[in-house]
């Protein structure tokens, strides 16, 4: 059905992009508003590091910023092409990478996982691999080699 309505899908446009655009077709939020939402979300993430709380969720973010959770979700999807979970996990993995680069003796990957806002190993490993292309162990070994050249 979607292929009949949008024949350009069959000519190289990505399906996900078209479905996302259709999902928000009736929402009349301007690009400038959506970008301002992203700016506020980014500021909060960087200044308050709320992503380090393993239980932090979209409802809490919306309440903190006094912005509709739907508007935040739409802004993340349309501007950054990410879901809330993908967005927050990107921040968590960036933090984990920093911790791994500065890993002190006696600390391990499990400690980094908890300090980065993850509360289970599977989620941490899957997200780390998805975002960096490496496992946390591979990343740590690569950083060790870099430091000891």
Image (cartoon, rainbow, N blue to C red):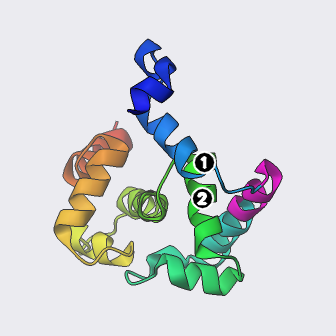
Q: What secondary structure is found at the residue carrying circle 2?
A: helix
Q: Which label number is shown at residue 33?
A: none
Q: Which residues are magenta?
A: 30-38
Residue 37 falls in image quadrant:
bottom right
Magenta span contains residue 118: no
Residue 38 percent location from the top left of the image: 68, 60
The one of 50 and 56 positioned closer to us in this rendering: 56
In the image, is 144 to the left or to the right of 38?
left
Q: Quadrant of the N terminus?
A: top left
Q: Indicate whether 134 appears above or below 101.
A: above
State the residue at coordinates (49%, 52%).
82
Say which residue appears at 70% left-offset and 80% top-offset.
Answer: 65
Write down the residue under mark 2: 74
In the displayed image of the protein, which residue is found farthest to the right? 32
Q: In terms of image quadrants, where is residue 127?
A: bottom left
Judge whether residue 34 is colored magenta. yes
**Spatial distance from mark 2 to mark 1, Cα to Cα?**
6 Å
Where does label 1 land, which residue? Answer: 78
How far from the left and from the top, in percent, is residue 47?
Answer: 67, 74
Q: Residue at x 29, y 70 (%)?
A: 113
Say if 147 sits above or below 43 in the image.
above
Q: Judge whether residue 107 can be spotted in this image.
A: yes
Residue 142 vs 60, above or below: the answer is above
Please say if the residues under marks 2 and 1 sit with CB atoms less than 8 Å apart: yes
């Amino acid at each position: 059905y979607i292929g009949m309505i949008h024949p350009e899908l069959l000519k190289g446009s990505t399906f996900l992009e078209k479905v996302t655009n259709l999902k928000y077709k009736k929402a009349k939020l301007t690009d400038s508003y959506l970008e301002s939402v992203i700016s506020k979300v980014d500021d909060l993430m960087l200044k308050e590091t709320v992503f380090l709380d393993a239980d932090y969720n979209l409802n809490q973010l919306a309440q903190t910023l006094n912005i509709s959770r739907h508007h935040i979700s739409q802004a993340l999807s349309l501007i950054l092409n990410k879901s809330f979970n993908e967005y927050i996990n990107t921040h968590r993995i960036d933090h984990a990478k920093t911790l791994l680069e500065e890993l002190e003796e006696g600390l391990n990957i499990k400690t980094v996982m908890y300090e980065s806002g993850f509360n289970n190993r599977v989620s941490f490993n899957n997200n780390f691999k998805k975002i960096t292309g490496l496992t946390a162990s591979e990343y740590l070994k690569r950083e060790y080699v870099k430091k000891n050249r």
